[in-house]
Image (cartoon, rainbow, N blue to C red):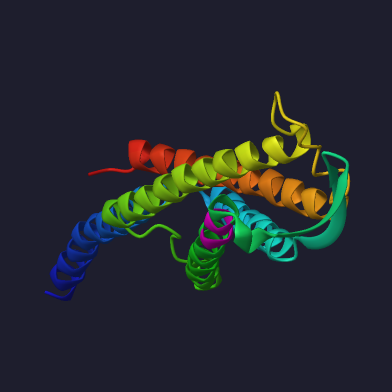
């Protein structure tokens, strides 16, 4: 009787082992579905957030410090002129967009770092991926439009207006124009980084399981 009992116990263990293995495989498969990227890609996503936040802060700080006073000759008269970023709606647009993008990047960075430290997937679900993708797309379009609008004003300042005696205002206002140029460059760079993040999210969505 004892031999029969031992054989029955061994049979039960033999039956239970495959079930335990199957449960483990299911858990592993679910984890893989939630993390189609891998750790290296998630770290790259965090790096993109850091760079985007830095470029947005540089664009913002360069623009808000753009101000200068000087004199310019118009029709033979020396006139005092003052330039400041707040005098232009296009430059104000750059400041507003850069501030919002910096806040968005900081929020996404904090979320991603906290999940990396907990060793959980940076993107938890397809809904989360779609929301982040939509945000990155909207802010990418906003930054490129802000940079384009500010570029038009800056180009006018550097070339003057055709068929008039108006001078190149960036000669007497060199510091102001340099600050604006740096801000515009980093605004376009922020757009590129947001687009790169959006591409990563598209790849995540294409690889993740429904």
Judge from the rendering whether residue 21 lies leftward or rightward of residue 4; answer left or right. right
For the image shown, how many numbered marks are present on the structure?
A: 0
**Image quarter of the N terminus:** bottom left
Residue 53 visible in image: no
Residue at 65% x, 44% y: name it: 189
Q: Position of residue 93 (x, y in %)?
A: 52, 55
Q: Position of residue 52 (x, y in %)?
A: 61, 54
Is 94 covered by the magenta stretch?
yes
Q: Position of residue 192 (x, y in %)?
A: 59, 40
Question: Residue farthest to the left?
Answer: 1
Judge from the rendering whether residue 162 lies leftward or rightward of residue 196; answer left or right. right
Question: Residue farthest to the front?
Answer: 76
Question: Residue farthest to the bottom?
Answer: 2
Is 157 covered by the magenta stretch?
no
Camera-side residue of 140 and 107: 140
Camera-side residue of 207 and 193: 193
**Image quarter of the C terminus:** top left
Camera-side residue of 1 and 130: 130
Camera-side residue of 111 and 83: 83
Question: Residue farthest to the top?
Answer: 163
Q: Position of residue 137 (x, y in %)?
A: 41, 45
Residue at 15% x, 66% y: name it: 8
Residue at 22% x, 58% y: name it: 19
Residue at 81% x, 37% y: name it: 167
Give the extent of the magenta segment: 92-96
Residue 62 visible in image: yes
When the figure is inspected, residue 155 is found, relative to residue 32, above or below; the finding is above
Judge from the rendering whether residue 93 lies leftward or rightward of residue 63; answer left or right. left
> Could you tell me what secondary structure mostly forms the magenta stretch?
helix
């Amino acid at each position: 009787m004892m031999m029969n009992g031992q054989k029955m116990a061994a049979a039960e263990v033999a039956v239970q082992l495959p079930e335990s293995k199957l449960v483990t495989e299911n858990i592993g498969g679910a984890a893989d579905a939630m993390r189609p990227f891998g750790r290296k890609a998630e770290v790259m996503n965090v790096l993109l957030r850091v760079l985007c936040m830095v470029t947005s802060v540089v664009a913002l700080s360069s623009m808000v410090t753009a101000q200068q006073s000087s004199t310019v000759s118009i029709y033979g008269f020396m006139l005092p002129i003052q330039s400041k970023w707040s005098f232009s709606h296009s430059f104000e647009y750059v400041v507003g967009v850069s501030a919002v993008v910096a806040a968005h990047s900081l929020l996404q960075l904090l979320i991603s770092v906290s999940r990396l430290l907990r060793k959980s997937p940076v993107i938890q679900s397809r809904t989360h991926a779609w929301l982040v993708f939509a945000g990155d797309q909207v802010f990418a379009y906003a930054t490129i439009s802000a940079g384009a609008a500010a570029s038009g004003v800056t180009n006018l300042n550097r070339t003057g207006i055709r068929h008039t005696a108006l001078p190149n205002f960036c000669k007497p206002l060199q510091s102001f124009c340099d600050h604006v140029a740096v801000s515009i460059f980093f605004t376009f760079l922020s757009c590129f980084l947001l687009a790169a993040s959006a591409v990563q999210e598209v790849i995540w969505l294409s690889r993740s399981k429904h």
